[in-house]
Image (cartoon, rainbow, N blue to C red):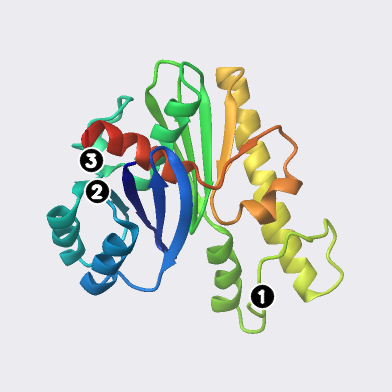
Amino acid sequence: MSTTLCFDFGNTRRKVAIFKNADVKEVLLLQDDSNTTIESLVRESKADKSILSSVINHNEGMEEVLAAKTKFHKLSHLTKLSFTTPVGKPETIGADRLALTAGAVHFYPNKNNLVIALGSCITYNFINKYHELVGGGISPGMEIRLKSLNDYTAKLPLIKADSNAPLIGYDTTTNILSGVVIGMAKEIDGFIAAYEEKFGNFNVLLTGGDLVHLGAHLKKKIFADPELIFKGLYAISEVNNP
């Protein structure tokens, strides 16, 4: 049985999924990316393959550890992919967006797919039925919106995200939740509607840490998959780490 470590290093968290063959067995939140931590993870999981998607300045030494102890691949614009990126500067596409696109193409092939990832930022990623990553958009995520209201005002508090956001707030906290949570849901619904006008039918794939707060507020039918980025990373690893 093959064991693959799929690392997803985002702006907020460093996470890794442990795959046994093609199945996700465990998702871990890493406290750090030190060589010691990575060596311990490889040893305990008995990993023989690994792949890294990183949008942060991570510890580059971990790449040497993974390369020495596993078949390692670092996701970049040079990676062999199951789709094309006919955009002006493919080298500027984030590794996380490449992984999400790979997941969409793998599980929903030959279809138009809009992947919406809810992390530090919201990313909209449209992949057409010809497996071309056409492009998309980026906007502030929930944590950024909540924090900015506190940072850029004199008296508004920093509150925690909550899925129980009312349409009409009745105090400061619920007013903020209405503006942020309901506002994000309306933004997403609006983008989906605009894409529908342009492309017709397509799948909407929703993933990311804030999925739990937004899913119930969206009007459109969606496929919710919190592990889509890991599944995409695994699919890419299978091509680049045969």
> Mark on residue 48?
2
Kindly state the secondary structure of the residue where label 1 is placed.
loop
Q: CA distance from mark 3 to mark 1?
A: 37 Å
Question: Dot 1, how many residues are within 10 Å of its Cα: few (below 14), some (14-19), or many (20+)?
Answer: some
Q: Do labels 1 and 2 touch, CB within 8 Å?
A: no
Query: Viewed as shown, does residue 176 lie left or right of 34?
Result: right
Quarter of the image with the C terminus in it: top left
Does residue 34 appear in this view?
Answer: yes
Q: Position of residue 241 (x, y in %)?
A: 22, 37
Where, by quadrant of the figure, is residue 12 drawn?
bottom left
Q: Residue furthest bottom?
A: 155
Residue at figure coordinates x 57%, y 42% from the top left: 225
Residue at figure coordinates x 44%, y 65% from the top left: 29
| Amino acid type indicated by mark 1 | Ile
Residue hosting label 3 = 91
Residue at figure coordinates x 85%, y 60% from the top left: 168
Ranked by sequence position, the earlier of labels 2 and 3 is: 2
Tag in front: 2 or 3: 2
